[in-house]
Every structure is written in C-alpha cells, then in structure tokens.
Image (cartoon, rainbow, N blue to C red):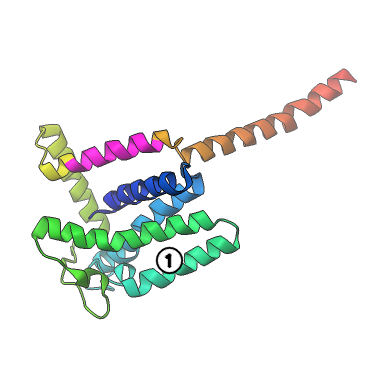
C-alpha cells in the first residue's frame, strides 16, 4: 500500500472512531497526527532502503511491530503529558494501522499473506528494494497514474483508490476541514493582531 493510501485509510479510521466514540469531528492536531503517523513507517524505511541502501527492502525498522508498539505508546504518553491525549490516540491509530494494512494489501495484490512485512529483524522482507531511488521511483509511479487517467484506462484497483479519495475528501469537509481550518483561523488572528498594532496607534495619534 502506498503512503497516500495509508494517509486516506488512517484518516478515515480515526475520523469514524472519533464520531463513534466521542460524537465529535477530529481537531486539527489529531488530523495531522493520524495522517503523519500513517505515512511515517514509509518515510523511515523507503528512503533508507531505496535511496541509501541501509535496508534490503522498504519494509524494515519502521514497519516492525517491535518498533511500532513502543513508539506508539511513547507518543501516547508524551501527548498525554502535554495535555493532548487524543492526539496521542490519533498517532497510535495511524501508525499501528499501517502495518496490517500492508499485509492485507499484499494479500489482495498477490494472494500471499506476508506477516514478515512487520516482523523485522526477526524476519527480513524479500520485497523489491526499487534500486532506481526513492524520488525517481515515485515520479515514475505518478507518471503512470497520470497516463492512465488521461487515457481513461482505469483499473478496478485505481477506481477503488479514487472512490476512497472522494469519500475521505467529503468526510474531511464534513469534519470542518481540520488542519486547514486551524491554519486559516491562525492566519486570521495574526492579520487581526497585525492590523491592531499597525493602524490603531496611528488612529489614536490622529485624535490627539
């Protein structure tokens, strides 16, 4: 499963969990945490494997359950200590959901259950290392997507992807566009503060 697919699945899972348990939409920090955590295993392993040859494949330390569980617990404890426990939950959901998602994706694509994808270093994955490099590989992949879309040649897998993207986008809008919402509100506060600092003193001076 590709990083953007993990981001979509992670956000969908946490948003639905948030609505079911708390009857609320995710806040900006939670939305950022779940999306960042859902792609973090790939951000750790893929560049180190494909670009720097540290690992033999893109499924190593970041995808290991032996690393993921302690990291998620540490993230949850840290978030709780700073008064943001739900952001810690979001981080754990995003990160821990990444691992079984790759196993299920491998089964859906190849018909093989590969638990070894999340058992490094006990078991080393034999998945391709894509030796052309991290950046070059993703540029090639996106070019393939673009060509398929322009040609109208959509596979069942790509149709499912686009359906998930649309559903996640609609849910994100329903949630109030978290992250973007906080950025816009923060920008508005800065502009209002700047206006008060720049213009109001001059107005007071003119009255004198």
Q: Is residue 125 magenta?
A: no
Which quarter of the figure has residue 46? bottom left
Farthest bottom residue in view:
122
Residue in the foreground of this view, choosing between 89 and 206: 89
Q: Position of residue 11 (x, y in %)?
A: 37, 48
At x 16%, y 35%, the residue is: 149
Q: Position of residue 19 (x, y in %)?
A: 42, 44
Residue in the foreground of this view, choosing between 206 and 7: 7
Q: Quadrant of the C terminus?
A: top right
Indicate left or right for 150 with 52 as reference: left
Q: Is residue 152 above or below residue 204?
A: below
Indicate left or right for 134 with 202 as reference: left
Instruction: Judge the density around disc 1: few (<14), some (14-19), many (≥20) Cα neighbours within 10 Å.
Output: many
Whether residue 204 is visible to the viewer of this picture, yes or no, is yes
Q: Is residue 168 magenta?
A: yes
Magenta-colored span: 160-172
Residue hosting label 1? 72
- Element assignment for label 1: helix
Whether residue 133 is visible to the viewer of this picture, yes or no, is no
Residue in the foreground of this view, choosing between 6 and 134: 6
Q: Position of residue 121 (x, y in %)?
A: 27, 79
Q: Is residue 174 above or below residue 38?
A: above
């Amino acid at each position: 499963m590709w990083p953007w697919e993990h981001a979509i699945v992670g956000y969908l899972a946490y948003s639905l969990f948030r609505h079911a348990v708390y009857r609320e939409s995710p806040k900006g920090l939670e939305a950022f945490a779940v999306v960042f955590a859902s792609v973090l295993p790939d951000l750790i392993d893929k560049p180190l494997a494909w670009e720097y040859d540290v690992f033999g494949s893109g499924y190593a330390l970041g995808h290991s359950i032996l690393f993921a569980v302690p990291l998620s617990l540490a993230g949850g404890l840290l978030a709780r200590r700073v008064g943001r426990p739900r952001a810690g939950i979001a981080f754990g959901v995003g990160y821990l959901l990444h691992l079984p998602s790759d196993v299920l994706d491998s089964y859906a694509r190849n018909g093989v259950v590969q638990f070894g994808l999340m058992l490094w270093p006990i078991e080393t994955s034999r998945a391709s290392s894509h030796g052309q490099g991290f950046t070059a590989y993703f540029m090639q992949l996106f070019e393939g997507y673009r060509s398929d879309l322009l040609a109208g040649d959509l596979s069942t897998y790509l149709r499912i992807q686009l359906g998930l993207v649309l559903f996640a986008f609609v849910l994100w809008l329903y949630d109030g566009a978290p992250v973007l919402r906080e950025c816009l509100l923060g920008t508005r506060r800065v502009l209002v503060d700047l206006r008060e600092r720049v213009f109001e003193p001059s107005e007071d001076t003119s009255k004198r």
